Every structure is written in structure tokens, then in C-alpha cells.
Amino acid sequence: MKVVYFDNNATTRVADEVFEQIRPYFCELYGNPSSMHSFGGQVSRKMRRAREKVAQLLGCEASEIIFTGCGTESNNTAISGTLAAYPNKRKVITSRVEHPAVLQVCRELENHGYTVVEIGVDKKGRLDMNRLEEQIDDDTALITIMYANNETGTIFPVDKIAQLAESKGVVFHTDAVQVVGKIPMNLSQRPGIALLSISGHKLHAPKGIGVLFVRKGTRLRPYMLGGHQEAGRRAGTENVPGIIGLGKACELADENMAAENSRVRSLRDKLEKEILEKCPDCMVNGDVENRLPNTSNISFEFIEGEAILLMLDRFGICASSGSACTSGSLEPSHVLRAMGVPFTAAHGSIRFSLSRYNTEEEIDYAIEKIPPIISRLRELSPFVKPK
């Protein structure tokens, strides 16, 4: 059966060009980059080139890149490493709609005596900037707020947050896992962003590789100890194939960013428009004027999102009912609850997230299959009164 993949915010396929680059590092160029011999040294040189490619996409210096195991590790490192570097400060500010890789860490900190403030959002998922500014005080060690929401695609005012944090002398970290490769970064021109997290498998690199950007001069204690790797900032033998693959994926992302913001956006808009026209009682969640070009989160009232996904799966259509890291929960999305989405709609929320590999034919196929699915589920729903 043909697979139509609209779940790219969960993970992306590895680009063919990336796979071709990384294959030799499993079989032929398997040397340890930390070894003194030339067999390992050649691997170290390739890693250095990959680091430069990542830095080029981010618009920063290669020395500001720390390779990690994933976006979750990058987030944990940013939070824990900052707090360890500022032991006399006991307050962290975040948002109510963060990915669990940030939100769960912050909530665990409360068990260790930290004050954690979760800033709310409005019905479009936009951050309450006035509340954020009010909460910054001399005890604030860190502000950690995502660049764009993984469920709705809503983009946060990161530059305003960064300027505010810099003016108050507070470290600002942003989880940019969903953003890198879709929106230009140019971090050299944005000094208020001290720390930024990336995950390779969100931009067509392999799983198991991430990056933490650490601006030069930012105080950060290592999160993982036990070796000299990454200039002593992250111990452990490097994931060489992942690093090489991420470097190539960043190069490809730079080349394809214009297409992401034109062709992919156009496909997303077509899918969304047709669904809204053909399926009554549905709505788009998030800020439709200011969101990622590939993401659409639609609530179908009076039916369960899990039922929609199961019926989509029969036709080979892959989507999501929220974050892949919380998909085992039967509770409505914490993001949609924070936005005040009605309970009858929050349970029927589906996220469609596209990539440059999606086609117009796939969009047409989904438009053909989705309305009958929604109609059938509403016929079965106890919450819909018969006409």
C-alpha cells in the first residue's frame, strides 16, 4: 500500500544524499575521531567540515556548535547546564505549551526547590509577552521558550524575548527543533539567543543526532561527563555517521529553504482549505498568519482524533494527534488545552506536517479520503445529533 506521509514534525525521511554520505562511516571509515592515527584523523576532519555546514545554516561560528544525541538532550543540557552555572539563581521561566523535553524538565526542577513560571498563551497560541516581562527578576537564571510550537506551528516572538532577556541579564534558550531548515537563523545577528536546540531527524538527517548552539561567552556546565569530546563540553564518543549526515542535511536545508516557504506552504494551504470547505464543524488551531510553512493543526469537533488516525491509516495516510512524545496519552493535547480549545474539538485534533518530499498528488489523495472519514465518524459519534 502506498504511504502518504504527513507526519514530518514527528520525524522525516533521511534524504538520499544524506544516506550516501553516511554509509561509508558504518563500513569503511569506522575510525574513532579521537584516535591519534591517520585512519581516525581523516574522520575527525570530516566531522570538522560537517560542523562548519551546521554553523553555516545557523549563521554562527563552528566553535559554538556542540553535537548531542538528540533535541531532548540539547534541551536538558541547556537547562541543567545553565542552572549549574548560576547556582545562586533559582527561577526558570518557560511556557505552558513547550515540548515535554522542556516542560517535564522544568516541572522536575520544582521538586528540587526551583521556582518555575509557565507563561500562558491566547486562543491562537501566542505568548503573553506582558506576563513574561513581569516575571523576570534578579533570581531568574533562565528563560526557555520554544521558537515555534511543534503541534500548531505557531511561531513565537523569539527576537523580542531575546532582546528582553539580554536587557535583563538573563540567559535565553530556545528549542528550535521544528524551525531549523524552514526559517533563516543568522544567529550572529541575534545576540540575545544564548542557547538553541536542534534535532537532526527533523530535517532529513538520521535519528540520534542533535545540536546545542552555545553562544561564545555563555556560561554552561557540561551535562555529560567522562571524556574530552566536543572541547570538553559533552563527553562520549561522537556519533560520526549522524554528524556527517547532519552536516549534509543542513547543506540541503539551506538549498531548499525557499521551496519550503513556497511550494510546501502552497501544498499545506491547499490541503487545509479543501478540508475546511468539505468538512463542517472543523477549525484550524494556532496563529494562521504566523506559523511554520509546513504545519496545519485541524480540530474536527465531536469525534476522536485516534479514530481519525486509524481510519487514515487504512488508506496509508500518516498524520498525528499531537506530539509524538505524548501520543500514548488519552488526554487532550496540553498545547490545545493551554489555548482554550473547546473539549469537543481538542479531542479531535489532527496535525498534518509536510516536507519537501510531499507532492500535489498526495494532497489530492488526502482531500479525496478525509471528508468521507470525518462524515462516517460523525455518524457513529454519540455527540452528534441525528438530522
Image (cartoon, rainbow, N blue to C red):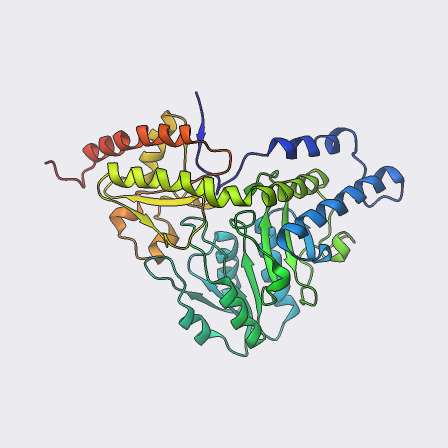
Question: How far from the left and from the top, in percent, is residue 382?
Answer: 18, 38
Which residue sits furthest left? 387
Q: Residue at x 42, y 48 (%)?
A: 151
Residue 249 visible in this rendered orientation of the protein = yes
**Is 230 left, or right, of 6 in this rendering?**
right
Which residue sits furthest bottom? 138
**Is 300 left, or right, of 213 in this rendering?**
left
Question: How far from the left and from the top, in percent, is residue 21?
Answer: 70, 34
Question: Quadrant location of the N terminus?
Answer: top left
Question: Quadrant location of the C terminus?
Answer: top left
**Is 10 left, or right, of 39 in this rendering?**
left
Which residue sits furthest top? 1
In this view, the residue in front, 195 or 382, is 195
Q: Is residue 371 above or below residue 105?
A: above
Question: How far from the left and from the top, in percent, is residue 96?
Answer: 42, 60
In this view, the residue in front, 285 or 324, is 285
Q: Residue at x 47, y 33 (%)?
A: 358
Residue 304 visible in this rendered orientation of the protein = no
In this view, the residue in front, 355 or 265, is 265
Which image quadrant for residue 46? top right
Count of all numbered marks drawn on residues in the image: 0
Q: Is residue 217 above or below residue 43?
A: below
Question: How far from the left and from the top, in percent, is residue 371?
Answer: 27, 32
